[in-house]
Image: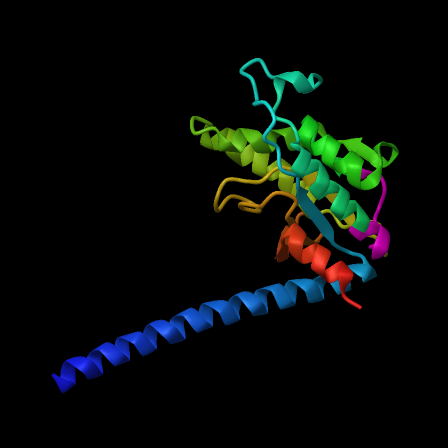
Amino acid sequence: MHLKLRIILVIYAFVFLFAASEVDARKIEIGNDTAILDNLKMGGYILYFRHGEATIGQDQPDLNLNDCRTQRNLSNHGREQAQAIGDVFKKNPFPVHFPVISDPYCRAKDTADIIFGKENITVAPILASIEKLKIESLSAFEKQQILSDLTKIFETPPARGKNTVIVAHTFPPNVALGEIPNLGAVIIKPKGSGNGYEVVGRITSEELIRWSDKP
């Protein structure tokens, strides 16, 4: 009986320590990423944002990138998210290279417009191909071509002392930048043409807002 009790206590202790380590690891991850945000003030990075929450409508089979009615669009909450991130850039401005780069989908363009202003946005049609990566029937050749084109963007350093900002889509799990929450950001360190890039941090919109509110 005493042996069984001892085994149960050991199991509970193990579970508790595992859970605690998970929490600690999460704290470390957030802490490191917010430290990276401070480094952004020096320039040299790419901030890749996913668009805000988009639950209005759906992408139609005859989707037209010039017609928002054929697409899934920002919800009111998605617009509020974008406005909050816009406030972050006003309170704690990173040195941004303008124009900011947006995907041609309406939900990405609208997110970028709300944050930075329509006059500060340029559209990169190649970013629309990110959505194709979610097609199960996509050939390996097509997938590799898309990823190669995106790598050329992600490995290109911004102007000296500036950061490039991109607003586009999430990726499939374990592909390129991976899954990104609504208006979450992936922080990329470009290594130059032909040298690839490094993902140095990830941060949610909530964490970014908390960082901007710190003294």
- Left or right side of 23 for 90: right
How did the renderer colour the structure?
rainbow
Magenta stretch, main secondary structure, is loop
Question: Along the line of sight, which residue is nearer the eye, 167 or 80?
Answer: 80
Question: Along the line of sight, which residue is nearer the eye, 63 or 157?
Answer: 63
Residue 201 to residue 6: above or below = above
Indicate yes or no whether the magenta region holds residue 169.
no
Estimate the x, y position of residue 157 in percent, counting from the top left.
76, 50
Estimate the x, y position of residue 53 in percent, counting from the top left.
62, 37
- Left or right side of 151 for 26: left
Residue 128 appears in which quarter of the rendering?
Answer: top right
Q: How many marks?
A: 0
Estimate the x, y position of residue 208 in percent, counting from the top left.
70, 56
- Left or right side of 110 for 150: left
The quadrant of the picture occupied by the C terminus is: bottom right
Residue 173 to residue 190: above or below = above
Residue 157 to residue 37: above or below = above
The residue positioned farthest toward the left in the image shown:
1
Residue at position x 79%, y 34% in the image: 113
Indicate yes or no whether the magenta region holds residue 97.
yes
Residue 43: tell me if it is visible. yes
Residue at position x 27%, y 75% in the image: 11
Question: Along the line of sight, which residue is nearer the eye, 106 or 5?
Answer: 5
Residue at position x 27%, y 80% in the image: 10
Residue at position x 66%, y 49% in the image: 185
Residue 47 to residue 63: above or below = below
> In the rendered structure, which segment of residues is drawn in magenta?
88-100
